[in-house]
Image (spheres, rainbow, N blue to C red):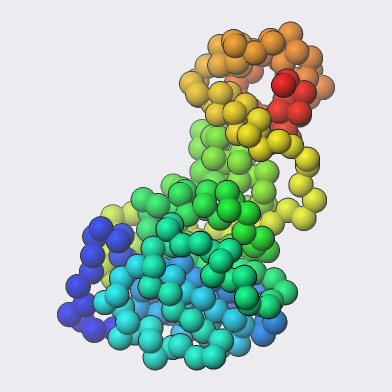
Amino acid sequence: MNKNFNFKKKFGQNFLIDKDKTQRIVDLINANEEDLIIEIGPGAGALTKRLVKKNAKLICYEIDDDTKEYLLPLENEKTKIIYKDFLTANVQEDIKDIEYNNLYIVGNLPYYITTPIIEKIIKEEVDVKKMVFMVQKEVGERFASKPNSKEYGSITVFLNYYFNIKQEFIVGRRCFNPAPNVDSMVISLNQKPDRLPVDMKKFDRIVRDSFQFKRKNLRNNLKNYDLDKVNEILGKYNYDITHRAEEFDYKVFVDLSNNLF
């Protein structure tokens, strides 16, 4: 890329320059010509160049107009660059006229908006088969953490309801230009085909309330609920209200949501 490119801190621009890591990310997207790929933040097109070769339908959301010199040459009848902030885009509207079998989403996400991007995809009910994201290492560890680990929190529970999450590999800070201050991690999120039925508003409420004071147990965090009923539900999993939320698998919160209201 142009060595004089003006990297913009406000956009969290750290472009991946390691070709091996780039190819490993692309290899995690097993799309074919009948599928659709959405890339978030293509930047100088390091991933985009390789995604185009899959011959799938491809939409890229890029916020920085200055990247046009790299991205416009990659456009073709199946590849479209949309110069818009993904967080303000109406994704369902943008893809409504595209025929495809499976949807994949990939991106090197700016650290400060990683969670809002994923929450947007979930909230807008974008039916995505698999997502592959490069995120800050600590964020990846949090997303893929297991119960009883210090990284486990409310966002972990939400994501595990929707996806099977896997830590794929670490990407060191020297693989970027400019180099960030932290290492990154590539994670994959595969949609769970048969999710447990639950009212998401109730699920959201019970999870947030359960984690509101992470070091406190459920007796304290859910004191405004029927604690006898909470105890009864937790008993099925050999827990009680003296336990902390960080000890529970997402299925416990689904059960609480379905039976407490």
Answer left or right for 149 relative to 198.
left
Seen from this angle, which residue lies furthest left?
4
Give the residue displayed 67% in from the left and 49% down from the top.
162
Q: Quadrant of the N terminus?
A: bottom left
Residue 86 pos. (x, y %):
44, 62
**Looking at the image, how many numbered discs can be counted on the residues?**
0
Does residue 243 sit above or below 185 in this rendering? above
Vertical arrangement, residue 78 with respect to residue 60, above or below: below
Is residue 30 shown above or below 204?
below
Give percent across and percent down for residue 118. 52, 53
Quarter residue 226 falls in: top right
Front one among 166 and 258? 258
Residue 184 in sight here: no
Q: Nearer the viewer, residue 66 or 45?
A: 66
Q: Please tell me which residue is depicted at 47% across the width and 54% down the height of the picture.
A: 117
User: Percent x, y for residue 48?
Assistant: 46, 80
Relative image position of residue 112 (x, y in whole percent): 36, 50
| Residue 75 visible in the picture | yes
Front residue (pair 139, 59): 59
Which residue occupies the foreground of this view, 80 or 248?
80
Horizontal placement of 104 versus 256: left or right?
left
At horizontal 34% and vertical 62% (from top left) the residue drawn is 173
Q: Residue at x 39, y 68 (%)?
A: 84
